[in-house]
Image (cartoon, rainbow, N blue to C red):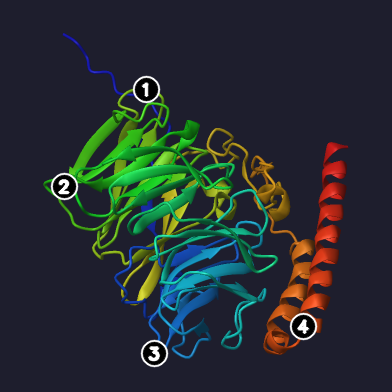
Amino acid sequence: MSRKVVRSSKFRHVFGQAVKADQCYDDIRISQMTWDSNFCSVNPKFVAMIVDASGGGAFIVLSLNKTGRIDMSSPTVCGHTGPVLDIEFCPHNDNIIASGSEDCSVMIWEIPDGGLVTPLKDPVVKLDGHSKRVGILSWHPTAHNVLMSAGCDNVIILWNVACGESVLRIDSHSDLIYSACWNRNGSQILTACKDKKLRIFDPREGTVICEKDKPHEGSRPVRAIFVSDGKILTTGFSRMSERQVALWDPLNFGEALTLQELDTSSGVLLPFFDPDTGIVYLCGKGDSSIRYFEVTDEAPYVHYLSMYSSKESQKGMGYMPKRGLEVNKCEIARFYKLHERKCEPIVMTVPRKSDLFQEDLYPDTIGPEPSVGADEWFAGKDGEPILISLKDGFVATTKNKEFKVIKSLMSTTSSSLSNRQSDSADVHALQNEVKKLREMVQDLTKRVSELESK
């Protein structure tokens, strides 16, 4: 009699658990927009959520420890003139957040350390370049101050935030862009488009490296992300509107490595990948569950692990970076689930009896230090992520020194904007200041690399 061998995995028993009611963020009016973005962004200091706002767009930023009922009069970030569609914290500076809106602009904000005390209306810098609403934002994973935005004008713009200017435009899409993301070191961009094509770009050349037609047969939105070893995971719909998840090898795009049907729900599946554990989490908009799978090198490549279920559906989802987790509780992921009127953290845990640091669960992970500067990256230099150990837990360091220098430029930029339009002398002075600051940044970068090599 043959015995079926169960695949061994240390993540087979991962379970999700909602936190107690007093650790949720209550009485927040989450945005009613039907846009398919996460509506939430988190880091080890703050949680930010897009909220309903009259006469414009707003999002609320709270310190992680400010749980319980949130006062209706709590200050918001409210500088946009149209609804906010996407927000994302900078991975290299926990106080910086970008927002994209229906008013066609991208704004960069600096959140004070203790959180907001008064409404924040003036951004550090405003990035204008899209002709239609901006629905997708993504910071470069390793280069400092590089931001990607994608709008409903079917254009992707790469910004040098330090200078407040667009450096590269990619307009190879013939229809709406559903998703756009970087690979691990930021040398490639992956997009999914309404024209039913996946494209991998060389971002600095603006050229398509390879593309895949119809990764999913259905006409509903497709999401695509890079997973380990350069492979691509997509979520989409079959011709019969069944939700699917598929894994692709870009070196052989003809046939999917695996394609699995999940259910017949209508919500778009938002994928979140953890490169340290190889687990991908699928959170459906409007679902009340989070499915998780392990991505491995052996067929069928995407192995179903389990599902976290609850009673209430989710309007959006935030995903905590690894350095914000509690390693002494064997926490391998934490989600911030948005309900109609509250935000509920959900903790994913591997059950272990020992309370010692579990090295197999926490290999060195991506830290907050960038490995290249914006100018270096745009000039063609790639940098691998700088990894940190979580053995003693992550301790947030002081704010990035470079940003203070850049911040002084930003305040000059925003405060003298109106005068500059009419005064060319100011423009010349500002150009000189930019030049000096660039030289200073290059010197600092050089010094850091010299110190690291020692």
Q: What residue type is labelled 2?
A: Glu
| Structural crowding at the residue carrying mark 1, measured as other residues with C-alpha within 10 Å and reported as few (<14), some (14–19) or many (≥20) | few
User: Could you say which quadrant of the image residue 397 lies in?
Assistant: bottom right
Left or right: 369 in relation to 446: left
Secondary structure of the residue carrying tag 3 is loop
**Pointer 4 with pointer 2, Cβ within 8 A:** no
Identify the residue under disc 4.
424
The single residue placed furthest to the top in the displayed view is: 1
Q: N-terminal of the two: label 4 or label 2?
A: 2
Secondary structure of the residue carrying tag 1 is loop
Which residue appears at 57% of the width and 86% of the height? 121
Secondary structure of the residue carrying tag 4 is helix
Question: Foreground: 446 or 392?
Answer: 446
Visible residue check, residue 13: no
Tell me where residue 128 appears, x and y as whole percent: 55, 73
Identify the residue under disc 3.
54
Which residue appears at 67% of the width and 43% of the height? 380
Question: Foreground: 433 or 409?
Answer: 433
**Alpha carbon separation for disc pair 2 and 1:** 25 Å
- Mark number, residue 242: 2
Tell me where residue 201 appears, x and y as whole percent: 48, 44
Tell me where residue 2 appears, x and y as whole percent: 19, 10
Q: Which amino acid does label 3 sit on?
A: Ser
Q: What residue type is labelled 1?
A: Glu
- Mark number, residue 298: 1
